[in-house]
Image: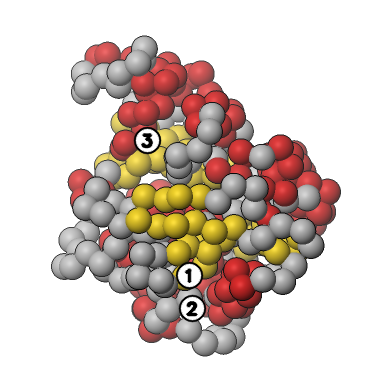
Amino acid sequence: MSDNAPRPVLVIGEALVDEFPDGTRVAGGAPFNQARWLAALGVPVRFVTRIAQDDAGAECVMTSARRCGLAEDGIQRDPRRATGRVAVQLGEAGPRYRIEADSAWDHIDAAEARAQARPFAPAVVMFGSLALRAPASREAIDAVLGACSALRFLDLNLRDTPRLQALAAQALERADWVKVNDEELDRLLAWFGHDGTPPAEGPARREALTRLTSRFGVQRWIVTCGERGWYTLDGEGRRDATGEAPAVPKIVDTVGAGDAFSAVVVAGIAAQWPLARSFDSAAQLAAAVCGVRGAVPDDPAFIDFWRDQLGLNRACLPAPTGPIG
C-alpha cells in the first residue's frame, strides 16, 4: 500500500551560522536543520525565522535553504540586526555551543509569522526552546500556535543561556509532544519532577516522571540516548516503546543528529506512518548523520539515498538545485 502524501509542517525558530574550530562556517540552528531535512525528504514545510537584510550569514542561510528546496516565504529580513552566529566547540563529551546574543532571529515579527501560519494550515508546528529567550520571537511562536490547531512538537535543545530553567518551563507549557535527550530529561526531572536530583530507575523516578508530565500536560515524550537508542513515554509518564541505535562505523561528529531524528519523527506524523516506523526511521537517519560532517550533509547522493530509504512521497519534491550545505 502506498504512503499518504505528507501533510504540511510549519517550523519556527532560529536560523544562524555555525562556526567550527577549523574555520568552517555552515548554516545551522536546530529549527533550520529540521526544516531543511523536512524539505529535502519531501514534506511540504514552511520555515519562519529572521535573518539580516544583507550579510554573509544571510547569504549562507539562503543558499542552503534554496539547495534543500525550502520555501523562502517565511524567512523575514531584518535591516538592523545581524544573522545569528554560534561558535561550535567539539570534544569527547559532544559539541558545545557559544551563542551570540540579540541576533535577527530574536526578533521574528509576530504578525508576519501569523500570516504565514493561517493559510498554510499545518498539521504539525515544530519549535524549540531557544527562540523563546527574546520577547519578540516568543510572541511570534505564540502567534503561530494560536493561529492553527496543529500538533505542537517541541524539540527542547537545552543550551546554556540565561534563565534556562524558566525558558524550559515556558517551552513545555506550549508543547503536546516533547523530544529530549536523556541528559535533558534528567535536568527537567531535577527542576520540575523531583527536588534537586534526578532519581535513579525505580518507583521514585516513575513518580517524578508522572509529576513532570502532569505538570505540563505533555502527551508524549521522545527520549534519545545516543548509542543506547531511544524510548518514549506516554501521557502519564510511563515507558511505552523502546528502540536500539543503529551502529555508526566511524563517528565524524554528532552535530545535528538529534535534529535529523526529530525531523523524521515529524515527517512520519505528517505522512501518518505507524509510530514504530517513524521512530526506527528517525534512529537510522540520526546514526547516518553522525558518520558525516555537519547537520545537513553537502552530498546530494546522501540525501537521495535517505529520501529513498525512508520512502516519503517523491511527488512533493522540488527539482534538485545542487549540493545541500
Left/right of residue 1 with respect to residue 320 in the rendered view:
left
Left/right of residue 215 with respect to residue 148 in the rendered view:
left
Counting residues from the start of the chain, the first of labels 3 and 1 encountered is: 1
Tell me the crowding category of disc 1: few under 14, some 14 to 19, or many 20 or more residues within 10 angstroms, Cα based: many
Q: How many marks?
A: 3
Do the residues bearing badges 3 and 1 touch, measured as CB atoms within 8 Å? no
Q: In this rendered view, identify the residue nearer to me: 284 or 15.
A: 15
For the residues labelled 3 and 1, the Cα–Cα distance comes to 25 Å
Residue visible at 59% across and 29% down in the picture? 170
Residue visible at 81% across and 54% down in the picture? 112
Left/right of residue 191 with respect to residue 250 in the rendered view:
right
Which residue position holds label 2?
324
Which residue position holds label 1?
26
Identified by mark 3, the residue type is Glu
Q: In this rendered view, identify the residue nearer to me: 290 or 21.
A: 21
> Is residue 208 in view?
no
Nearest-to-viewer mark from 1 and 2: 1
Could you tell me which secondary element the residue under label 1 belongs to? Answer: strand
Could you tell me which secondary element the residue under label 2 belongs to? Answer: loop
